[in-house]
Amino acid sequence: MTTSVETGTDGNNSPGRLSLGTEAARNLATTTKSVPQMQGITSRWLLRMLSWVHVPGGTYRVNRRLTHTLGDGRVEFVSTGADVRVIPAELGELPLLRGFGDPAVLEALAGRFTQREFRPGDVLVEAGHPADQVVLVAHGKLNKIHQGEYEDPAVLGVIADGGYFGDKALAAESESNWDFTVKAVTACTVLTLPRQAFQEALEGSQELRSHVEAFRAAAARPRNEDGESAIDVSAGHTGEPVLPGVFADYELSPREYELSVAQTVLRVHTRVADLYNEPMNQVEQQLRLTIEALRERQEHEMINNRQFGLLHNADLKQRVHTRSGPPTPDDLDELLATVWKDPGFLLAHPRTIAAIAREFNRRGVYPDNAAVGGHSVPAWRGIPIFPCNKIPISESGTSSVLLMRTGEESRGVVGLHRTGIPDEYQPSLSVRFMGISDQAIISYLVSAYYSTAVLVPDALGILENVEIGH
């Protein structure tokens, strides 16, 4: 007699099975496990590509040649509905008024500005006409245009929110004419102050007159094209002429960068550390993920911190606006012109890099690739473009592209840290045992020390207001 046997379909060792089920067998097997994974870990190209300078004293002083460039900031405004007014103290961002501290005079000057609106294509000032006003751009984008050598107009630059022009007309002792034309690219709101109104304020304030006279005297000192005090050199002479005697003057109050710190306290229960340390050390894995989070925050601060972050420490003359919004090859070339002395690399948000690729594809331009550390990354003009998700994207879908030269020997951007600190776990990162609490919890203080410094202004350039959703 033959007896039929049914094979069970579940994973249990039921009477109908002919062999051991996999679910039961796994209880006796050793599983293969991965270490704890963390999605927030990025490539952190900025930390990898910067040249790092050891700062044993905790403070890094950047000594520079003395410069006579006064005031190159951006002006801020306050708006009430559609009415826009310049903040009186912000007039100190104009070169002529930098360092002038009489609030009553600044308040009177701010009240003399007149708000004007322009549509795309409108001309604000025209070359050859009297330069009789200073113009503050509250909102919008303007092109600064000059007649080219071949009769076609040439765009000298872009003036956008917070920018200004015509300030030299106020500083001049005599009237002059505009040597450029300014045309609106988008709808614009500007505030204007006539030269005559400034002269009236000048006549009514002895303090303002003294300040303006001191500014004119400083502007008359010899300087090079970068604003540094000039070093006279004689060349191509014959005979025995008297050679100029020179010295390189320095800034009397150079900037100092103090190391910043990112810290956190790692807590691990002793029971976990004692009983669950095989096959992976729980303390080591907790520490690894904590350090990754600290390094991510470190890169974020090195880009966004208002005291030393790169986005806030680029010279305003090194900031370039896109001509049409999206990041075109022309815009990248304009950015390269600001850091033309041995540029190192470009840094952009991944979505910005995608927008760059779209513009290249639309124009039929094929960028290069660069091999860096075993990675193939996109490049432009041989300059690698690295992704960095710490560069912010605004609510309106705009971002920035950074270009920098690195290293002390190249007078570039450097990272600052201090090695050899107590309980050092990685360079400039310490893990310090803090004790065990009454709840049997082990605590470790994890600290990372860092900062950044821009040695000379032309070491860092930024392409601003880049539209990435166009």
Image (spheres, rainbow, N blue to C red):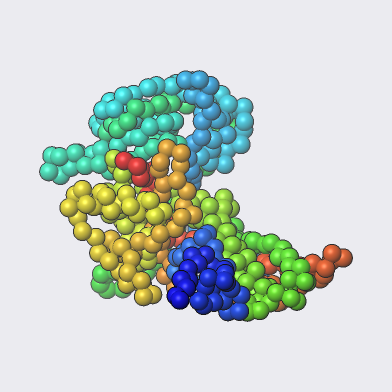
Residue 368, x across and y down, in percent: 25, 64
Q: Residue furthest left?
A: 150
The quarter in which the N terminus is drawn is bottom left
Residue 182, x across and y down, in percent: 30, 33
Q: How many marks?
A: 0
For residue 142, above or below residue 276: above
The reply to whether residue 172 is in sight is no
> In the picture provided, is 334 more to the left or to the right than 86?
left
- Looking at the image, which residue is at 25% across and 49% down? 359
Residue nearest the observer in this picture, 468 or 290: 290
Residue nearest the observer in this picture, 429 or 435: 435
For residue 83, above or below residue 71: above
> In the picture provided, is 463 more to the left or to the right than 20?
left
Residue 385, x across and y down, in percent: 35, 61
The reply to whether residue 24 is in sight is yes
Residue 394, x across and y down, in percent: 46, 42
Residue nearest the observer in this picture, 327 or 163: 327
The quarter in which the C terminus is drawn is top left
Q: Residue furthest front?
A: 1
- Looking at the image, which residue is at 35% across and 42% down? 469
- Looking at the image, which residue is at 53% across and 67% down? 11
- Looking at the image, which residue is at 75% across and 76% down? 274
Q: Quadrant of residue 336?
A: bottom left
